[in-house]
Each structure stands twice: as structure tokens, then as C-alpha cells.
């Protein structure tokens, strides 16, 4: 007893019980929305149990009538038995259909909810997780929660009802029989203990391993070109084998334990059913009960054993539920982005659509969560019809600056606004809501699989073919799209496959231009183009009548001459470069 108190105290101290309690509350918060579905589920289960118990009673009457122990109408009892058997089939099929329907619906709803929560989670916090891990949490853990919510409480009620009602019937007809039928219960409880102890640990390890395997496969398939190019095929197949071996070892280890437990459970099951059988024969032989009662007892002893086993199996499913809840809570309880300025941004955009919107940053400082300090008291500004360049050596902070502009990162100090109106005096704080004002062309290939037109319409659903072609022309992409047999209906493979890097970059720029956002951000977005095309694209953007503010990051000073202002990112600040310095950079390039 002392040991147990110590164990509970140890768990409390480590916070395990507190954690499980928090996870249970979290599941409850989700579960309470689906109380109607749960009631329906429970009622269907209870009806099924009721129908099958009545069938047992009728079958007892039938046997007793046949063996002459009871007088009654054979035909009507037989008809009732058939009727209830059919009802049993119908109820179980209807309940199967209803449960599949509810399950699918609730599963999609919960996944949708978690997906949207993940999307509004603070970006930097989210990047601590591998995408494979995120997908596994979203798919298997969310499914676990939805099926758990629907099944756990209803099953607890249904199994308890099944157990109590079967026990009541047995007790009514012959209490001694109940003793035999419940013979296995203490053994089942005893056996389930060691299994449960390892269940939580195993569940956690298994979820982490699944995520690792999924992440490995996902990364390998998306980097197949690199794997081939570095001749890493054997290395990767061996790596997969080693991961699979770890997974198999873990599963087998657990399986051994399960096999041992289920063999012991089955032996107990045999002992119980043969004891019931023997006791039944003895009672019939001593004329204490009829044949019919014996048949009924045998079927009810099966019902009792299965109800007990089902009740015991609810414990591991509760453990796996809380583990999944914990894994989802890790994600959805991270800081969330604040979109409260959405309507203010929308009216700001509407008000200044004609004259354009710029941005202004003063004395901003930013340090990543891991302690890398990138900016300290940095200031910069960019206004409509300007192309502002950010230059600097690799790793100095150009991409970080664009992430700050997009509010993917939140500065620790300083002021940062979008601005418009006379002397840029009308300002709005930067926030995730101000992202609507931007179009962003990141480094690398960011086209989705689908046709060119579909990719374009991803950012502007109602774009006409003419508008798409206009944007392609501005981005110097129309030259090659025009020559394709299917034109804008040509298919792009995953990650821009089927097009050269430079072509994919121009398509990405066209997509950003089509969106007609007040501020355009190009992160090394013209790096794969030849200098002449790069300059032409930027000139086109500048000459476009749309009042756009354009910010580009570049390693190539060849385009700096056509920029309105050039900032060099140095010593954690943004310094405006004079003409002399720009010319020097161009010469030295
Ligand atoms: N997610 C991150 N977490 C922590 N540190 C980061 C993260 N991303 C970038 N850094 C660090 O911030 C600094 C600036 O990186 P950034 O990507 O902004 O440079 P950059 O100027 O765009 O480089 P490049 O020209 O090579 O693209 C680097 O020291 C980098 O290691």
C-alpha cells in the first residue's frame, strides 16, 4: 500500500497524472460538441444488446418447448426467434452504417479543425517539427481522437449495460451459474496490469517511430534527384532497413507481451467456458434447470466474458487517446497568430488601392528562438512605384528581413508599419493580417502540380485568360508559354517539374504579379535568369501602371542600377548605399 502511495506521489511530482488530466480535459472539450452523435451511437449499441439478449431468452423457450419442459406455441416462438434474429442483423447493419457515417464526418471535422489551427500556429515554433512528424500527428493522432471520442464513452455505457443485463438474467435464473461465468474476471484484471504498464510507453514510442519513418520516406521521395546524383541509393535503402528494423524490434517486443497475455486469457476463457458447460450439465442432470436454460446460460456466459474483455480493452484505448491528445496539444497549444486586424487591413487596402501602399521600419531588432541575433536597430522604407533592393553576403539576413515583413517572425523591439496617404502618415501595424497586402516569390521552385492556368488562378480565382497572359508577359514568361502546344493549359509537374529553373521562376513571378498586391517581395526570385531577362522583368514591373511597391533581395549587383534605393545588410542594420558604392559593387562583380 505504501509502495502504491509512493508511486502515485512520484507520478504527481513528475506531472504525469496532471498531464493525463489536461489531455483528458482537452479531449472532453472536443468531445462535448459531438454529444448528439455519442447518444445515437450509445442507443444503437444498447438496442443491439437488447435485441440479442431477447433472442437468447426466446431461444431458451424454444429449446424448452421442444424438449417438453415448457408448454407454449412452438410455431409462434420459432417465428419470434427468426424475427429477432433478423432484427439483430438489421440493427447491427444499421448501427454499422450510422457509425461509419458519424465516424467519417467527425474525423473530417476534427482534422479540418486541427489543420486550420496548425496553419495559424506561429511559423518559427512550427518549424521546430519535421513536416513528416506534423503530417503523422495530423492524420493518425487526429483519427485516433475522433474514433476515441465517438467510441469510448458510448462503448463504456454499452459494455456496462451488456454486462449488467446479462448478469441480471443469469442471476435471476441461477445465481450459482453467475459465479462460474465470472470466474475469469479477477485473472483478466490481474493479467491486464503488466500489459497496461507498458502500453503507454509503447504507444509513445510507436507514434514517434511512425513519424520518423514517414518523414524519412517523404524526404527521400522529394529528393530523389539528389539521392541519384550522389549515388546514395544503397545508403538510403540501408537507412530505411535500419529504421524498419528498429520499428519491427519495437513492435515484436510488444507483440511478445501481447501473445503471452492473450494465450493466458484464452486459457482462462477455456477454463471458464468448460466450467460453465460442466456446471450446466450437472444442473440439467440434477433437474435443477432445463436444457433451454442451459443453452441460454452458455450463450450468456460468452456475452459476460466478452463484455468484461471489452471493458478491460477500453483502458489501453484510453491510454492511446491521451497520448494522441498530448501530441496534438504540443502543436495546437503553441503561440497562435493574431488575425484581429483583418477588417482594418481590408478597408486600408480599399482606401489606398489607387495610390498604393508602402512600408516603414524603424529601429527593429530580431533574434531567432535559438539565439541567433540577425537585426539590431535596423531601419528601412519602401514606397509605391519603387524597387528597393536588399543586398548583402550570404547569411547576413535578407530572407529574415522578408520573413519579418511578412510577419512570419515578430520583432522583439522597434516599430514596423505599412503606410499610405500624404507623407505616408496613415499607418497600420505589421501583423499576420497585413500579409494580404503582399505577394511573395520565395527562393526555389514554388509551383504546384497542375496546369499553368490552375497555378495562376490559385492566387486569383476569377482571373481571365487575358489577365493571366498579361501577367505572364510582364514576367517575361509568355515567350516560352506561347510556344507550348497547350499554352496556359500546359501541365506543370510536382515542384515545377517539366520546366527549367529560370522558366519556373518567371512563372512564379507572373503568379505574384497576377495577384496585384500592393507590395511585391522577390527573394532571389530572378537568380536563375540571365542578366538581360532579369533586368527586363524588373523594368516591366516598374513600368506597370499598378501602384506597386517592390522589394527584391539579390546577390547580383547587375540589377542595382535600376533600383530606386539599395540597402546593404551589414552589422545587423540596413544601410542605404550611395551611387559610388553601387557602381563599385557592379564593377567588382
Ligand atoms: N529558422 C531559423 N532559425 C534560426 N536561425 C536562422 C533561421 N533561418 C536563418 N537563420 C540564421 O539567420 C541568419 C540570416 O539568415 P538568412 O537566411 O536571413 O540570410 P540570407 O542573407 O537570406 O542568406 P542567403 O543569401 O544565403 O539566402 C543566418 O545566420 C542563419 O543561420
Image: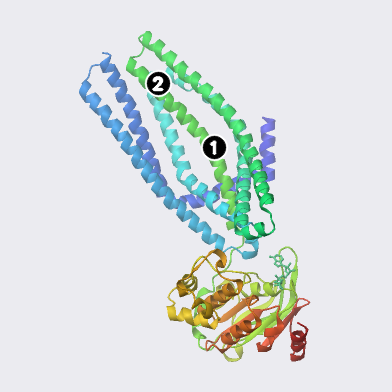
- Which picture quadrant has residue 43? top left
Task: Give me the residue at 65% from left, 78% from top.
Answer: 416
Image side of residue 242 versus residue 144, left or right: right
Indicate which quadrant contains ligand 1. Answer: bottom right
Residue highlighted by disc 1: 315
Residue 282 location (% of width, % of height)? 41, 10
Residue 11 location (% of width, % of height)? 67, 41
Q: How is the image coloured?
A: rainbow
- Which picture quadrant has residue 42? top left
Image side of residue 135 versus residue 52, left or right: right
Residue 289 location (% of width, % of height)? 35, 14
Q: Is residue 475 above or below residue 37?
A: below
Quarter of the picture containing the N terminus is top right
Q: Which structural element holds mark 1?
A: helix
Residue 269 location (% of width, % of height)? 50, 23
Q: In this view, which residue lies farthest toward the top?
A: 286
For ligand 1, tell me if the residue under mark 2 lies within 8 Å: no
Image side of residue 43 versus residue 335, left or right: left
Closer to the camera, 476 or 520?
476
Residue highlighted by disc 2: 298
Nearer the camera: disc 2 or disc 1: 2
Closer to the camera, 583 or 59?
583
Q: Which structural element holds mark 2?
A: helix
Q: Classify 10 Å Cα crowding around label 1: few (below 14), some (14-19), many (20 and above).
A: some
Amino acid at each position: 500500500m505504501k509502495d502504491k502511495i509512493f508511486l502515485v506521489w512520484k507520478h504527481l511530482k513528475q506531472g504525469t497524472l496532471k498531464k493525463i488530466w489536461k489531455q483528458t480535459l482537452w479531449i472532453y472539450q472536443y468531445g462535448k460538441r459531438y454529444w448528439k452523435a455519442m447518444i445515437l451511437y450509445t442507443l444503437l449499441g444498447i438496442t443491439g444488446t437488447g435485441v440479442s439478449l431477447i433472442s437468447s431468452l426466446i431461444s431458451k423457450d424454444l429449446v424448452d418447448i421442444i424438449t417438453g419442459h415448457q408448454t407454449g406455441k412452438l410455431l409462434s416462438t420459432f417465428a419470434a426467434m427468426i424475427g429477432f434474429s433478423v432484427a439483430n442483423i438489421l440493427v447491427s447493419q444499421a448501427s454499422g452504417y450510422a457509425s461509419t457515417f458519424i465516424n467519417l464526418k467527425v474525423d473530417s471535422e476534427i482534422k479540418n479543425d486541427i489543420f486550420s489551427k496548425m496553419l495559424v500556429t506561429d511559423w518559427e515554433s512550427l518549424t521546430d517539427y519535421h513536416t513528416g512528424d506534423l503530417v503523422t500527428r495530423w492524420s493518425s493522432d487526429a483519427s485516433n481522437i475522433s474514433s476515441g471520442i465517438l467510441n469510448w464513452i458510448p462503448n463504456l455505457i454499452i459494455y456496462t449495460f451488456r454486462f449488467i443485463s446479462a448478469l441480471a438474467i443469469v442471476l435471476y435464473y441461477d445465481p450459482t451459474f453467475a459465479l462460474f461465468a465470472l470466474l475469469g474476471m479477477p485473472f483478466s484484471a490481474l493479467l491486464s496490469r503488466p500489459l497496461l504498464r507498458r502500453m503507454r510507453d509503447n504507444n509513445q514510442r510507436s507514434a514517434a517511430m511512425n513519424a520518423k519513418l514517414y518523414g524519412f520516406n517523404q524526404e527521400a521521395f522529394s529528393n530523389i534527384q539528389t539521392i541519384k546524383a550522389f549515388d546514395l541509393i544503397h545508403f538510403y535503402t540501408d537507412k530505411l532497413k535500419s529504421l524498419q528494423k528498429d520499428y519491427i524490434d519495437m513492435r515484436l517486443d510488444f507483440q511478445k507481451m501481447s501473445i503471452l497475455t492473450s494465450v493466458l486469457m484464452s486459457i482462462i476463457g477455456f477454463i471458464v467456458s468448460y466450467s460453465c458447460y460442466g456446471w450446466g450439465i450437472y444442473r440439467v442432470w440434477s433437474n435443477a434447470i432445463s436444457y433451454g436454460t442451459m443453452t441460454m446460460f452458455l450463450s450468456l456466459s460468452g456475452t459476460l466474458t466478452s463484455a468484461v474483455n471489452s471493458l478491460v480493452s477500453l483502458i489501453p484505448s484510453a491510454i492511446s487517446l491521451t497520448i494522441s491528445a498530448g501530441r496534438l496539444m504540443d502543436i495546437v497549444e503553441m503561440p497562435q497568430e493574431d488575425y484581429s486586424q483583418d477588417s482594418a487591413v481590408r478597408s486600408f487596402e480599399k482606401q489606398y488601392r489607387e495610390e498604393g501602399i508602402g512600408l516603414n521600419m524603424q529601429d527593429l531588432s530580431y533574434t531567432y528562438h535559438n539565439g541567433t541575433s540577425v537585426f539590431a536597430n535596423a531601419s528601412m522604407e519602401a514606397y509605391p512605384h519603387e524597387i528597393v533592393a536588399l543586398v548583402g553576403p550570404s547569411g547576413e539576413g535578407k530572407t529574415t528581413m522578408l520573413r519579418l515583413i511578412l510577419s512570419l517572425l515578430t520583432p522583439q523591439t522597434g516599430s514596423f508599419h505599412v503606410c499610405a496617404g500624404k507623407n505616408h502618415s496613415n499607418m497600420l501595424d505589421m501583423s499576420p493580417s497585413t500579409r494580404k497586402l503582399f505577394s511573395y516569390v520565395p527562393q526555389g521552385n514554388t509551383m504546384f502540380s497542375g496546369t499553368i492556368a490552375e497555378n495562376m488562378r490559385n492566387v486569383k480565382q476569377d482571373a481571365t485568360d487575358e489577365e493571366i497572359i498579361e501577367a505572364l508577359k510582364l514576367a517575361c514568361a509568355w515567350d516560352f508559354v506561347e510556344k507550348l502546344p497547350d499554352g496556359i493549359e500546359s501541365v506543370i509537374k510536382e515542384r515545377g517539374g517539366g520546366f527549367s529553373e529560370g522558366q519556373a521562376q518567371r512563372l512564379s513571378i507572373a503568379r505574384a504579379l497576377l495577384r496585384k498586391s500592393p507590395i511585391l517581395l522577390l527573394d532571389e526570385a530572378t537568380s536563375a535568369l540571365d542578366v538581360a531577362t532579369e533586368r527586363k522583368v524588373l523594368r516591366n514591373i516598374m513600368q506597370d501602371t499598378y501602384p506597386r511597391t517592390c522589394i527584391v533581395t539579390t546577390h547580383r549587383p547587375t540589377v542595382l542600377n535600376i533600383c530606386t534605393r539599395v540597402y546593404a545588410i551589414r552589422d545587423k542594420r540596413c544601410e542605404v548605399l550611395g551611387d559610388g558604392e553601387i557602381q563599385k559593387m557592379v564593377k567588382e562583380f
